[in-house]
Image: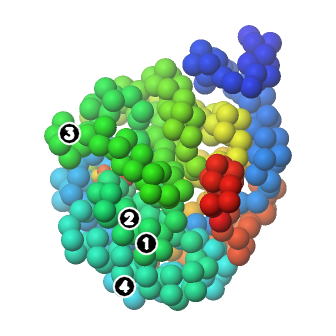
Amino acid sequence: MTENIKEILNKDFFSKEDLITLLSCEDGESRKIFELAAATKKKYVGKKVYFRGLIEYSNYCSKNCLYCGIRAGNSRYVRYQMTDEEVLEAAIYAYQNRFASIVIQSGERNDKKFISEIERLLIEIHQLSDGKLHITLSLGEQSEDTYRRWIAAGAQRYLLRIEVSDPELYTKLHPNDRHHNYYDRLEALKTLRKIGYQVGTGVMIGLPFQTIDNLADDLIFFRDFDVDMVGMGPYIEHEDTPLFQYKDTLLPLNERFRLSLKMVAILRIMMKDINIAATTAMQTIDPQGREKAMMVGANVIMPNLTPVKYRQNYLLYENKPCLDEEAEECKSCLEVRIAMAGDEIGYGEWGDSRHFENRNEGKGE
Ligand code: SAH
Ligand code: SF4
């Protein structure tokens, strides 16, 4: 078996069977995967980790994904939307602290008011930073026209997780209506690519009904789509959601974490020059989860810049960490953690996906 893992890791291209073998191997053998992933990261993207200051703009959501704590059907949370001043203050903080990039994320809304508000904020952020702050949006599925307006207003990147790459599994995790359609989400990803965004996607790991076979397909999906960035992490159940009823069928949290770490490492080996996030969900299970992800390939981290008063209402899943940590504390904490992982922070650098740059030579920044 050990020999087998070694042989697979020597290949330039992993088949689905290879991926299943890698994902299923014992802890002792995963060490080899982790070592190769760390070396690959060092060689192709270096030891720098880039900050994306996270602004959780609003928890209003018109959708009802069966796993998510802020789904429209959950009445437990007070709904909020940050004021323009609060968003701009967070952007200024990021700019002054040389984060170089921010992410604006929220529940999904497609109304005209929301679309214009985002557009206006993008223009203002662009102005206040003289175009030096790069902006990632994570605002769900929108029309081509909306994506075009937002890129014209100053956004560069878009994060839209496919959530699971298997259309059949997708229907088990979402209501079966026209608002939750796998093929629409896939189409949205293609539109983002066509328009010129750096495109990020991702999946949750350890979901009800999900198999190792599904996860191997997810990795193949990232490769086939030729993504620029990936953010993925463990699924963490939330008691106010319909999927909570399956909690006893899930892998234990520590196994979901190990599997997520393996997914990150294998992906780094497969897609050497993309950006991979060390996600907050990893830290939710293991206090050092993000450092561990960085050590096996992740090179992007998202310090939370959302005002503390809103954080307990943006709980996509339970036990989300750092609910009372202001931006400054979060930054200091990350500095220590990143140094512990043996990496350094790319202050003042956009840290754009090298994969995107390589694909668009001459066109990308
Ligand atoms: N509304 C936007 C962005 C916010 S949700 C969208 O859906 O694209 C951001 C991500 O949170 C989702 O893509 C999903 O992968 C993740 N998420 C939601 N519920 C989760 C849970 N219970 N466990 C782990 N991740 C979850
Ligand atoms: Fe809304 Fe995104 Fe949560 Fe789905 S995952 S319910 S779209 S916030």
Q: Which residue is mark 1?
A: 152
Q: Residues within 10 Å of mark 4 (few under 14, many from 20)?
A: some
* Residue occupying image coordinates x 57% and y 63%: 302
Q: Which mark is residue 148?
A: 2
Q: Indicate the quadrant where residue 59 lies.
A: bottom left
Instruction: Give the number of the mark in front: 2 or 3.
Output: 2
User: Under tag 3, what secondary structure?
Assistant: loop
Of the image marks 3 and 1, the number of the one nearer the N terminus: 1
- What separation in Å lies between label 2 and label 3 (alpha carbons)? 28 Å
Residue type at the position of mark 4: Asp
* Residue occupying image coordinates x 31% and y 62%: 145
Q: State yes or no: discs 2 and 3 in contact (Cβ < 8 Å).
A: no
- What separation in Å lies between label 3 and label 1 (alpha carbons)? 33 Å
Q: State yes or no: discs 1 and 2 in contact (Cβ < 8 Å).
A: yes
Q: Which mark is residue 84?
A: 4
- What separation in Å lies between label 1 and label 4 (alpha carbons)? 19 Å
Residue type at the position of mark 1: Ala
Residue type at the position of mark 2: Arg
Q: Which residue is mark 3?
A: 175
Q: Indicate the quadrant where residue 353 lies.
A: bottom right
Residue type at the position of mark 3: Pro
User: Under tag 4, what secondary structure?
Assistant: helix
- What separation in Å lies between label 4 and label 3 (alpha carbons)? 33 Å
